Image (cartoon, rainbow, N blue to C red):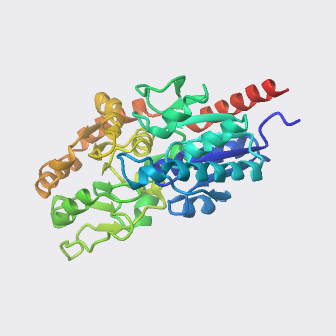
Amino acid sequence: MSDHPRSVLLAGGGSAGHVSPLLALADALRRRWPDVLVTALGTETGLETRLVPARGYPLRTIPRVPMPRRPNATAVRFPAALAAAVQAAGVAIDDTGAEVVVGFGGYVSSPAYLAARRRGLAIVVHEQNARPGFANRLGARLTHHVVSTFPSTQLPHATCLGMPMRREITSLDRTARRAEAREFFGLDPVAPTVLVTGGSLGAKRLNDAFQATAASFAPAGVQVLHATGAGKEFAPEVPGNGALPYRVVSYLDRMDLAYAAADLVVGRAGANTVCELTAVGLPAIYVPLPIGNGEQRFNVADVVAAGGGIVAADDLVTPDWVTTTVIPLATDQERLDQMARAAASIGARDGDDLLTDVVAAAWGERYQDNR
């Protein structure tokens, strides 16, 4: 009998917020147990369809079943749709011989939790956000192996162990990689650099405000690297004659180099973004997404309290705000240095290994119960 699980199913998909920690845990499991089979469970339409295979892991998909929020036709169909998704998750579990199911929330986790419970398997729940969603509130009722990213998260049995992050992020030395990173993106080697990102899907509010002010950065001595989201790219109007660049890309596959190139980040406040920026010690202006259950405002509470970031309400992000707030901060090196130290003071880099410990404990406990 192996002294560790032979097969683990990781359930999570849709956005990078779920896929990134899933892949970080997958890598950590492989480092610790090179012979373990790690399979991801996702949907057919999320980022996982590209990111999981690119990372070298098999992907199984199940139907996407959103939780209905009001009485309508979707709500009527929900029980049958959920049952079909649970059945599909069960097939993935049986086919892979999974002994532990780890869920990261989102559409695929609820069916995975329910299918695992029916089979008496070990279940581990990881909640990325300060405020948990429906799937992980359900999962936390089915297991006491519950891990949160933020200490304020209210889930039964939750232990705060941080966010699993990719080693290319947690091992990043921004200063040592800066020259390489700026050359990679075609940026000036010394000019203050602002990274603008709305996450994997982009943020229209940020894109519109920065597109309207793109020409204002170079005269202030600032360059920009702007990730807009796929299909949302624009051609910035900037001064010519060798002016500092304003680089627009749809997606950043090398986020480690983007962080190494940046002095200041302007972006949303997804949990993964907040944890990565504090881990690498990057100052940020956070613009929480104004929809959903409001978790993004809570995700940034600790870093803002420490002085490593500031918050801007979504409706205040205008072209005038960019020129009166973002550009002055980007050129205030003393303040940026203070914010960088504050951000790094609360950053954590070992969430992947700590979550692997929980997986081992959950499997060991279930194995002993079943002997």
Q: Name, please, the residue furthest toward the right.
A: 1
Residue 29 lies in what quarter of the image? top right
Residue 131 visible here? yes
Q: Position of residue 77 (x, y in %)?
A: 48, 53
293 w.r.t. 57: above or below: above
Residue 349 visible here? no
From the viewer's perspective, is 327 left or right of 346?
left
- Residue, x 67% and y 57% (percent of image)? 57
In front of the other: 61 or 168: 61
From the viewer's perspective, is 46 left or right of 309?
right
Q: Name, please, the residue furthest toward the bottom.
A: 241
From the viewer's perspective, is 77 left or right of 117?
left
- Residue, x 29% and y 55% (percent of image)? 194
Q: Position of residue 124 (x, y in %)?
A: 62, 34
Q: Position of residue 335 (x, y in %)?
A: 24, 38
In front of the other: 368 or 3: 368
Q: Position of residue 357 (x, y in %)?
A: 66, 31
35 w.r.t. 366: above or below: below
In front of the other: 132 or 228: 132
- Residue, x 24% and y 40% (percent of image)? 311
Residue 345 lies in what quarter of the image? top left
Which quarter of the image is occupied by the C terminus?
Answer: top right
Residue 98 lies in what quarter of the image? top right
